[in-house]
Amino acid sequence: MPNLSFVSPTRNSPWGTYLSQIDAVEPYLGHLARWVETLRRPKRALIVDVPIELDNGTIAHFEGYRVQHSLTRGPGKGGVRYHPDVTLEEVMALSAWMTIKNAAVNLPYGGAKGGIRLDPKTLSKKELEKVTRRYTSEIGIIIGPQQDIPAPDVNTNGQIMAWMMDTYSMNTGATATGVVTGKPIPLGGSLGRVAATGRGVFVIGREAMRRLNIQMEGARIAVQGFGNVGSIAAKLFAANGARIVAVQDHTGTILNEKGFDMQNLLDHVAQTGGVAGFKGGDAIANADFWKVKSDVLVPAALEGQITAERAQGLQTRLVLEGANGPTTPDGDQVLSDRGIVVVPDVIANSGGVTVSYFEWVQDFSSFFWTEDEINVRLDKIITGAFKHIWETSEQHRINLRTAAFVVACTRVLEAREERGLYP
């Protein structure tokens, strides 16, 4: 397994997981395999110092990253996360998965990702604005509407994107709404963007359930992570007749065999910040979440959650990866051996980047679509992409993850071959 001098991945670390996935797809690439090494190396990795003056007058330094894994098929595209556990290796892996995701859905983008190692809960709004603006200025040398387009991710939102867009615009001397996506509507944001990733998880889940003969009405759904992605997916599943029987977030785990009243749960989370203490369900141990019987499991938190040990105890028929990289390679193997179908992140959570693409297009044309138009276009693109991946899986008799990588890597490497090497 090739390595880079500045990271030391293990098999189940984010970058190690990605490299394992490339190893698995290589036998299906035919003559394009001669280019596969380009997928194992990010094109560009930028590490920046982000110093700010805190409200108390002291100076704090934070470490930030922007990694462009591939620009072969178009500008880089990928979110920015603020989290105390952000590392270069994690951002590299996330940028690589964005390359695969964009190609799997056939969007005209490469893959990129960014992050700052900090806990945003410890900063005031003013400090958060300072961090965002300084970080944007530092990475401004490699981002742009035709170069690399950031977006929201973990602990970032429309406000963060507004500050990034404004900072980039001030530094370049012209308003550039297309430099980021996920912006507020008054600044060129797209209707439907906030709910897009969760909606995409539901749409792909619906398609997978249909192919696996899992009835939506009464289906048992377990959701890990109840932020923007998990909560919206859960709400849509429930609205279409499924039962959300278990939910886990950073505050705890709750269970209701009959299914939660979703509006009451959403109201509780909005008021308290988490699912813990919700009266419409029973609190259970966090470890017991992975033993809840379900038809569909939606891991929508962080990467590396479904380990081999947890996979061995899962009682589900279908795993929908709402998060990026939630299943380790060893966990993936156990699920495959047990006959549990996994719809990989690169297609399951592709709704967000698809509507980000719509936003980018609308910004360039200064012509905006209705939310109904957005949802119809989203449904058409991601269901078509899923159909192609499903058929590839059946054709080669491989799991959906490997099939998604076959589709995506073939597209990236065909573009690489056509472009050639310069100089």
Image (cartoon, grey):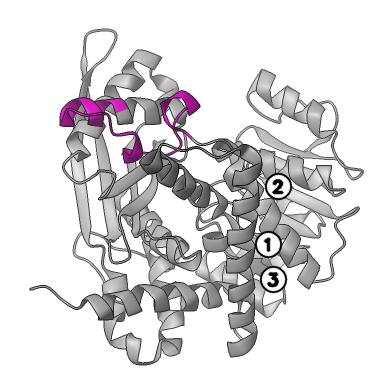
Which amino acid, by three-letter code, is at mark 1? Val
Q: Residue lying furthest top in this view?
A: 56
Q: Nearer the viewer, residue 391 or 15?
A: 391
Mark 3 touching mark 1, by CB under 8 A? yes
Magenta stretch bounds: 166-189
> Where residue 166 sits in the image (x, y, percent)?
29, 25
In the figure, 128 relative to 68: above or below? above
Report whether 46 appears left or right of 291: left
Which amino acid, by three-letter code, is at mark 3? Val
Could you say which quadrant of the image residue 181 lies in?
top left
Mark 3 neighbour class, 10 Å CA radius: few under 14, some 14 to 19, many 20 or more: many
Q: Is residue 85 visible?
A: no
Nearer-N-terminus badge (3/1): 1
- Which secondary structure, mark 2? strand
Say which residue label 1 marks.
Answer: 319
**Residue 414 falls within the magenta-colored stretch:** no
Report whether 283 appears left or right of 181: right
> Where residue 295 sits in the image (x, y, percent)?
81, 60
Q: Residue at x 46, y 33 (%)?
A: 189
Say which residue label 2 marks.
Answer: 223
Q: Is residue 369 visible?
A: yes
Nearer-N-terminus badge (2/3): 2
Mark 1 neighbour class, 10 Å CA radius: few under 14, some 14 to 19, many 20 or more: many
Q: Residue at x 11, y 73 (%)?
A: 422
Say which residue label 3 marks.
Answer: 341
> Where residue 200 sits in the image (x, y, percent)?
63, 52
